[in-house]
Image: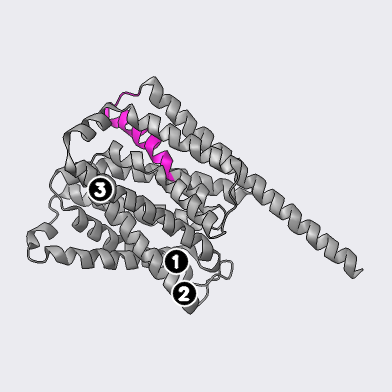
Amino acid sequence: MRSEQVLAHGALFFAQLSFSTWHILGKVVLNAGVTPLVFAAYRELIAAFLLFGVALLSTGWGTQSAIAARLIVPLKTDLLRVFAMGVCSFGNVGGFVVGLSLTSAPNAASLQPSVPIIALLIAVIIGQENLTAFKLLGVAFVVLGSMLVVVFDPEFDDASSGAGSHVVLGNIVLLLQCAALATLLVIQKAIVHRYHPIWLTAYYYSIGGALTWLACLYYVERREVFDIGSEPVWLVLIFASVFATVIAYCIYTWSASYLDASVISLYSSVQVVTTTALSVAFLGHVVIAAQAAGALLIIVGLCVTVWAQTRDTAVASNAETAKLLAYTDVEH
């Protein structure tokens, strides 16, 4: 495994910690009465400015980045894909915060393991990845482990039994959010090698933010909802914008240069473990044996899938080397 791939795995784990912290803080803020879509709109506005600012500071303005000669302005042939990524970003960010407001943090986390399944299916259908037994086994371990972590959580039972139709609607929204994230990762994998990761993230995320503000026109006659209130809410908003958005999504985009979309999407399942761990550390949450076993299955599933990708990459590299050697022999 190359050093860039090792770094990518570590960075993706940090992104999940950021997301998990945001899940816990975000639920507290939403319970205080903040309108979900408006909160998402402010988060995306702040993040978009930060992303373009970081991009300008790191590469300057032009048509090409000095880093690995990658483009910073989308090609005409990629404009539709970048826009589609923006639509998916809108569905992912807005969909999660709306779904979270209708359910609970454990409930929302329980559906994230569907992301790698959807991403793998899309990637296989369009020919971006090969479907192997080891990849299927890894996904199965992750999904089973996530189910154990969540289903045996008492808070999950309470949230599912008491909210009625709101939980059903919230789960539908969260499933659509998972599909949006999976689609985003697959599209991103197809074009990320051409672009600087920060610029690509800034483009698609700003498109998603613009769509979120358009959706907020629904509240145009209720201007009070745009006042998100106290200092603690703004602190959560800043954390969500910086760590759970700018840093996390730049990590996702950068990692796509070194890892398959299905492997990156599997890290969404790690949120179940990291959210539970943070709940134990800061909220006094109690973990039972079945949940610990589930966390172990998730780790095993990730290891199996990562090994499968490493093996596939090595096989492809050996095949390419053999082809080149054969061509050289023919020339001589």
Residue 39: give x, y in percent of width and height.
Answer: 21, 55
Give the spatial CA distance, label 2 vs label 1: 8 Å
Name which residue type carries label 1.
Leu
Q: Earlier in the sequence, mark 3 or mark 1?
A: 3
Q: Residues within 10 Å of mark 1 (few under 14, many from 20)?
A: many
Give the spatial CA distance, label 3 vs label 1: 27 Å
Residue bearing the label numbered 3 = 99
Q: Residue furthest right?
A: 332
| Element class at badge 2 | loop
Name which residue type carries label 2.
Pro
Residue at 44% in and 63% down: 198
Residue at 38% in and 53% down: 179
Q: Earlier in the sequence, mark 2 or mark 3?
A: 2
Q: Earlier in the sequence, mark 2 or mark 1?
A: 2
| Element class at badge 3 | helix
Residue 294: give x, y in percent of width and height.
Answer: 43, 29
Name which residue type carries label 3.
Gly
Residue bearing the label numbered 2 = 74
Residue contact between numbered discs 3 and 1, judged by CB atoms under 8 Å: no
The magenta span reads: 268-287
Q: Is residue 267 above or below residue 226?
A: above
Residue contact between numbered discs 2 and 1, judged by CB atoms under 8 Å: yes
Instruction: Find out whether residue 273 is within the magenta segment.
Output: yes
